[in-house]
Amino acid sequence: MEVCGHAHEQAEQCAYIIHFQGKYAVKNGPYDDLKPQCDAITERGINATIEVIAV
């Protein structure tokens, strides 16, 4: 909620999807915007990666 700016309900839904499916595209956007958020999540002990989608 704090890092991604999600409401409680949205954060809870993301957590359930990640728990049961193993991963979830929580955010989309430019790498420069996502990198600080990814770092903030991993600093909290949660695994996070940025995947580049080929167009």
Image (cartoon, rainbow, N blue to C red):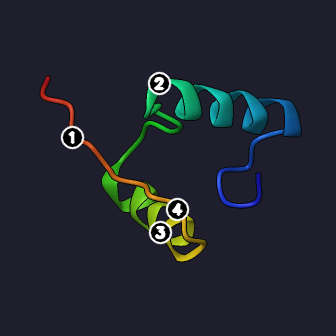
How far apart, in angstroms, are the residues tagged by discs 2 and 4? 21 Å
Q: Say what secondary structure mark 2 lies in.
A: helix
Q: Are marks 4 and 1 in contact (CB under 8 Å)?
A: no
Q: Are marks 3 and 4 in contact (CB under 8 Å)?
A: yes
Q: Is residue 41 left or right of residue 1?
A: left
Which residue occupies the extreme front position in the image? 20
How far apart, in angstroms, are the residues tagged by discs 3 and 4? 4 Å
Percent x, y for residue 38?
46, 61
Q: Amino acid at mark 2?
A: Gln
Q: Amino acid at mark 3?
A: Pro
Q: Earlier in the sequence, mark 2 or mark 4?
A: 2
How far apart, in angstroms, are the residues tagged by discs 3 and 1? 16 Å
Q: Which residue is mark 3?
A: 36
Q: Earlier in the sequence, mark 3 or mark 2?
A: 2
Q: Amino acid at mark 1?
A: Val
Q: Which residue is mark 1?
A: 52
Percent x, y for residue 3?
67, 60
Residue 37 numbered tag? 4
Percent x, y for residue 45?
55, 70
